[in-house]
Image (tube, helix red, strand yellow):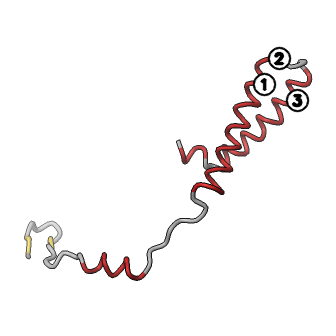
Amino acid sequence: MKTIVNSIITFLIALVGLIGGGIWAYSSNGEMEPIIIMTISILQITGFLVLRFVVDPTPVQETKSEQNIINNKKVKKQINIQENKGNIEM
């Protein structure tokens, strides 16, 4: 669900829905259907902006100390499997 809300294409569709719903609501003297479309579009745009700029604006990068900890936990023995021969060497 997060990827759908965070998508640029969905954001553009929500903008079209907001503009189209506004025109439709104005021309139909405030019927319920265009107001529902506008409400859903506003929620989508708000969710997009919150996810894009507030929740996690930049991905967290590993530091060198974290990389060293990960490298120290490597498996000491590696298994080599020869292709199409079924031989396993340890």
Mark 1 touching mark 2, by CB under 8 A?
Answer: yes
Residue 4 locus on image (x, y percent): 58, 44
Would you name the residue on which mark 2 appears?
31
Q: Element type at marker 3?
A: helix
Disc 1 target residue: 35
Nearer the camera: disc 2 or disc 3: 2
Q: In the figure, is residue 76 to the left or right of 8? A: left
Q: Residues within 10 Å of mark 1 (few under 14, many from 20)?
A: some
Q: Secondary structure at mark 1?
A: helix
Which disc number belongs to residue 17? none
Q: Earlier in the sequence, mark 2 or mark 3?
A: 3
Q: Residue at x 36, y 78 (%)?
A: 67
* Left or right, residue 24 beside residue 58: right
Q: CA distance from mark 2 to mark 3?
A: 11 Å
| Residue type at numbered disc 3 | Ile
Please state if 73 lies on the left or on the right of 14 as rendered: left
